[in-house]
Image (tube, helix red, strand yellow):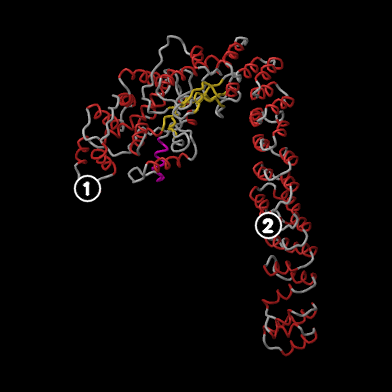
Amino acid sequence: MDKREERLINLTEEQKLERLKEETNYAYIKFLVMHLLKDENKLKMMHLLYENDVDELICSLQSDDLKLDYIRNLPQDSIRAVNVAKSITSDHEKSESLAMFQDEYARTEIIKTMQLDKNKMEAMFYYITNMSNRREIITTFINTENKIDGLYYIIDDDYERKKVIESISFENDEQLLQAVTVLHTDYEKMSLIEQINDIKNKEKAITNLKSDINKLKIIITLPEEDRLQYIPVIEEKYKDEIINSLKEDKLKKQSLSYAKTEEDITQILMSIEDEDFKLQYAQTKLKDETNQSMVFATLQNDEQKLSLAKTMKEKANQVLIQMSLKDRETLKELFLKQNRKYQEIDLGPEMTIGIEIETEGPKGRKLCQLEKIIERRDDFFEIKRHWKIEYDGSLEPNKGAETISPILRDTPDNVEEIYMVCQMLEQIGQEATDNCGGHVHIGADYLTSKESYLNLFEIWGNTERIMYLMSNEPGNIPRSEVDQNAASFTSIIEEAIKKGSIQIDGEEDLEELISGIQSVQDGEKFFGMNLLNVNNGKNTIEFRVANGTKNPDTWIENIRLFGRIVQVSQELVEIEKKEQITEEEKTNLELKEKLKEDLPEKEKMELLLDLLFFEDEKEVYRTRYIENVKILENMREEDNPLREINFVGKLGLKKSHKLEEFVDVANQERYETVGNIEQETIRGINGIREQQEGIRG
């Protein structure tokens, strides 16, 4: 404000009117008109203003009625009309003006300028249907409780609710609890419940959660004594976690009074350390023999457990107790058949192995409650390792159990464990049903280069359908949903190449190759070969094509089958690096290249056997393939479990070389004139020269 404006603003109303008669400067004319005190004088002088300044003058009027009259003469929903309506001081008149507008955005802008939350809420209810517009209004509420109440008006829009919640500064537990009762999803509720400090309020909030898994997440944050009341009312599968979250025996014993069923009592007793107490309680309070056996299985003394096992009338309950024994020699006596010949894996101790035995049966849930069996000390890592038993979502509830090995190697003790576990499952009555898969993991660190992975992909891709038929014992064709649980991996390779996720001829390193394929897998493990674990946690290559089985010989044969593919993929790279190779090595290079050709499947099968196995090993896999092919050929096409799988049948990722070319390439003096594979050959010949056993013929 300049000095002249300061003088003008201090004039009386009459002086301003007189001054307007002689003022020629428009800026000061507008200034004087705008600063008249009486509405009637402003309207009398309105003719002195340019048209685009008239709206501003109307907005400055004190009379809301005059403003309403003015709006009625403006085009409907115009920005001019909206600005005048926003300048109305009375909420009542503002609400009256809303009927003059049809556009929800215009109405929203007007409602946002109302003074009282109550009036905003009422106007919003009558005039606004769009959720985004409602959210804009609600976030302007002054009172926190009113904002929370406003959530009711956008209850069906997750995003808009989220934006309102973000605008609220919660002041106390009561407000948080109020919001929890209004919100729609557990996800929204959980973030607020975690902020509640008072235990009683948090307990009230828990009852508003729909999912028991979400209830559990909050329950285990409560003080231990407050967790007990939830044991009888939460889903069966989550009771264990509440019980296991209790640390003190005293509280666990106290929790028995909350248990309504024998199942609940059993779970609590299994977690109690006072062995005399739980033994006596189980013998006097539990009527079901299976529940008793589960409690007895948690005792520490093997002799005591063996004695209790003899009191069980049902064989499966005896086995439940026996499976929990710690003494390895006793386990061998119970679960290894005498004078039986055990197959050797024959992969060498350098390769790490893992298996997942899926079964279903009447004792499935009880097996999962055992959690761990066959303890052994891993001296290398100085830790104890166990076989784990847990539920898998692909199996039937209460019957399914997945028995997961620790890291295994090709040693007699580890082979024994496979035979023991299979015998345990057999004796307890578990079955490998059509729901069950037989997954084999091979340590990914066995493959050391991009070239070795490309070998693996080529061998697999050129024989993929054969693998599905060769991975199950004769007469056992792939399970009915194999296409959903173990889809074609070769299709992943093709998609990765098509999308540019991997560059076969590029300079990408091994890590980039793996991450490129994993990106196409998009978090899904359900392929015949699964690479999601590589460089991530387990660091294994998982083979998922085989059916579940309790036959330990089949497991050994499948471990050998998938292990050999990995083994050969690495050894072929080492052969390609050599300056001189044996006839046997030359044959293996030729066999791998031959698999890329368009050949009858049976002929390819024989080539694969020649590449992977010794002569005396081949017949097992040949018989599997031949018998299972016959079954598929004699069944209706709609019943064929492989009908939905798109097998590529031919995959070439590495440039083929005649053997003579390896020497020629090695003699080239300029590395930059040759491709990546040739350069790898030169490096191998001139720099590495590692001694490697010949691949099996």
State how far apart marks 2 and 1 are (Cα): 69 Å
* Residue at disc 2, secondary structure: helix
Question: Residue drawn 39% across and 27% down?
Answer: 562
What secondary structure predominates along the stretch shown in magenta?
Answer: helix
State if disc 1 and disc 2 touch (CB < 8 Å): no
Q: Which mark is residue 136?
A: 2
Residue 101 spot, x, y in % from top left: 72, 63
Is 272 rendered above or below residue 106? above
Depth check, front residue: 552 or 78: 552
Q: Which residue is mark 1?
A: 670
Amino acid under disc 2: Glu
* Picture quadrant where residue 38 is located: bottom right
Residue 631 spot, x, y in % from top left: 42, 19
Label 2: few (<14), some or many (≥20) within 10 Å?
Answer: some
Question: Residue drawn 20% across and 44% down?
Answer: 668
Q: Which residues are magenta?
A: 490-501
Does the magenta-highlighted stretch encompass residue 323? no
Depth check, front residue: 528 or 628: 528
Residue 671 shows in the view: yes
Amino acid under disc 1: Arg
